[in-house]
Image: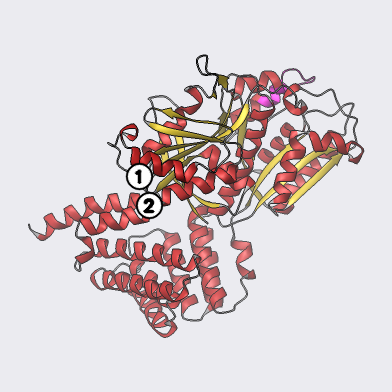
């Protein structure tokens, strides 16, 4: 095989390895890397760069688990790979990675030497085919590593100004700066003005009884958005507080991400149309201006208490996860009737969302409105006779996709031993060759899912608002096939030792149990042409 043919073959294998690494399947990524013989390659900078990335991810996992010495050794191995790639390729990317990794490995002298080489390469090759942001950010990181913090901050500020909305690029670079500065005991405060805007979850009482001074209320909301530097907002669009906040979000120039239980039509008919004045027109205008509109299943059903609660969890979790991706902070803004109505507030969906948010220790702003309680819509505060129930579902499948679980009593016995001590919201059931487990508690489901994945099973997870029914032959309460359709997609996407979750479950986990697990976006699954793609997340131990 010629060198060109071998490199072409390497590139094909690299694509699979990188996809697995991004999905959080690090063991599979490394196994695929080795099976392709890439661990023995010494003359292909792309292969060596991917090797460095895999080793860096492994070192971070070791560090997260307190294995400091092993982490430093692995950071050093990652630096070796990047440095070897840099010797074959004049690009600055592998060399700046090697420089930072040497620092993480404890070799500050070598880190400084490599960083100076990066600065020399930048000076010698000003036309390197990279984005303006990357060039300025790389120069900034190299200057920080050689100890010139003031110049590094100037370069970083220039990089941000060259790509003002490249939020993820900003976040990656800011994390590197924070890590390096923290290791040296430097104040990271000067980085704050360069951080992306904050994310927001917003909610409020659906209507206020009697007249309110809406102009004054809008000024309060706008002042908060400016003071908190809000750039991305998530919430519903019910008449009253939701729409008032959302309109100010749009006027402020922030992104609006609407989350509508039951979908546009059903939500509007339940939560907007019954109101007076021009709320319906305002609702439609906001939908046309929203950056995204997330419809909470079951679409078309009038939203009830469980669907509203799920919508709030998804909105809160999405705000939290976006803040994590962008290395910024998530906040909550609530508009509520004044303190004379504590009992109503505590029992409402808004009050529950506020309590969940406070429980996670995140910043919260409550603006009170001096107004009597209105007659509430059913979806806002009615808690009795709810039709839907929130259910966390796990699909458990064997590592071998061709294995017939029903024909493997050894696997079934192992699964029973792992799952037997848990309390389930609904009895376990078969579904398309998989075992479906149903929980009422998100943390319990996450813990078991991660345990089973660690033992080699393929795990899918979802959180649904659904109406269980009694099997006419056995009397067993169970979910129908429709609510379980996304769950089937998650487990089909999972590899051995991998736990894949829908956005519903990932977001709810971040809202309810922010320290229980890490949620990493891995892409979307289009189950059928024209259907809304299913966002997937890899669930890993925190």
Left or right of 139 on screen, residue 311:
right
- Image coords of residue 387 (percent x, y): 65, 21
Q: Residues within 10 Å of mark 1 (few under 14, many from 20)?
A: many
Q: Determine whether the residue tagged by mark 2 lies in a helix, strand or loop.
A: loop
Q: Residue 25 got which mark?
A: 2
Q: Residue furthest left?
A: 1
- Outermost residue toward the top in this view: 472
Q: Secondary structure at mark 1?
A: loop
**Considering the image in quadrants, where does the N terminus appear?**
bottom left
Q: Residue at x 50, y 22 (%)?
A: 480
Q: Which residue position holds label 1?
A: 495
Q: Nearer the viewer, residue 229 or 497?
A: 497
Q: Answer above or below: position of 371 versus 442.
A: above
User: Which of 251/360 is in front?
Assistant: 360
Please determine whether, in this image, residue 319 is positioned above or below residue 285: below
Asked whether residue 296 is in view, the answer is yes
Residue placed at 52% from the left, 64% from the top?
175
- Badge 2 crowding class, 10 Å Cα cut-off, few under 14, some 14 to 19, many 20 or more, is many
Residue at left 44%, top 71%? 139
**What is the span of residues highlighted in magenta in the rendered image?**
271-283
Rendered location of residue 148, percent (x, y): 51, 80
Please identify the quarter of the rendering in which residue 388 is found. top right
């Amino acid at each position: 095989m010629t060198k060109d043919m071998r490199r072409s073959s390497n590139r094909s294998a690299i694509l699979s390895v990188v996809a697995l690494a991004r999905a959080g399947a690090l063991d599979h990524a490394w196994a695929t890397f080795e099976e392709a013989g890439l661990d023995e390659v010494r003359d292909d900078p792309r292969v060596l760069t991917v090797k460095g990335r895999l080793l860096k991810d492994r070192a971070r996992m070791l560090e997260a688990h307190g294995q400091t010495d092993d982490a430093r050794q692995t950071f050093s191995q990652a630096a070796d790979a990047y440095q070897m790639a840099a010797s074959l390729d004049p690009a600055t990317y592998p060399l700046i990675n090697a420089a930072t990794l040497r620092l993480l490995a404890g070799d500050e002298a070598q880190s400084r030497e490599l960083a100076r080489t990066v600065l020399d390469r930048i000076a010698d090759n000003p036309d390197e085919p990279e984005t303006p942001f990357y060039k300025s950010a790389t120069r900034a990181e190299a200057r920080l590593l050689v100890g010139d913090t003031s110049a590094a901050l100037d370069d970083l500020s220039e990089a941000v100004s060259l790509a003002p909305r490249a939020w993820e690029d900003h976040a990656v670079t800011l994390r590197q700066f924070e890590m390096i500065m923290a290791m040296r005991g430097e104040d990271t405060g000067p980085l704050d003005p360069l951080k992306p805007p904050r994310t927001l979850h917003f909610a409020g009482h659906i209507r206020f009884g009697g007249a309110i001074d809406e102009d004054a209320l809008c000024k309060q909301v706008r002042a908060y958005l400016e003071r908190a530097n809000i750039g991305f907002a998530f919430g519903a669009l019910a008449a009253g507080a939701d729409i008032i906040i959302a309109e100010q979000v749009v006027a402020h120039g922030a992104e609006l991400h609407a989350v509508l239980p039951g979908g546009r039509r059903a939500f509007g008919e339940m939560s907007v149309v019954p109101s007076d004045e021009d709320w319906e027109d305002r609702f439609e205008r906001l939908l046309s201006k929203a950056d995204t509109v997330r419809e909470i299943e079951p679409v078309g059903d009038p939203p009830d208490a469980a669907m509203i609660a799920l919508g709030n969890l998804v909105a809160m979790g999405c705000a939290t996860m976006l803040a994590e991706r962008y290395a910024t902070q998530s906040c909550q803004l609530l508009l509520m009737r004044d303190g004379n109505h504590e009992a109503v507030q505590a029992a409402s969906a808004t009050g529950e969302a506020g309590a969940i948010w406070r429980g996670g220790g995140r910043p919260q702003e409550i603006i009170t409105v001096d107004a009597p309680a209105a007659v509430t819509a059913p979806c806002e505060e009615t808690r009795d006779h709810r039709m839907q129930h929130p259910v966390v579902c796990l699909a458990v499948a064997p590592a071998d996709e061709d294995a017939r679980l029903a024909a493997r009593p050894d696997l079934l016995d192992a699964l029973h031993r792992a799952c037997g001590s848990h309390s389930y919201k609904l009895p376990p059931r078969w579904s398309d060759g998989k075992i479906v487990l149903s929980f009422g508690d998100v943390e319990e489901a996450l813990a078991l899912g991660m345990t089973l994945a660690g033992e080699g099973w393929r795990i899918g997870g979802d959180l649904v608002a659904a109406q269980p029914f009694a099997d006419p032959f056995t009397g067993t309460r169970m979910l129908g096939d429709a609510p379980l359709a996304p769950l089937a997609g998650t487990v089909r996407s999972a590899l051995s030792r991998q736990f894949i979750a829908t956005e519903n479950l990932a977001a709810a986990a971040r809202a309810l149990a922010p320290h229980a697990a890490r949620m990493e976006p891995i892409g979307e699954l289009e189950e059928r042409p024209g259907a809304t793609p299913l966002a997937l997340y890899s669930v890993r131990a925190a």
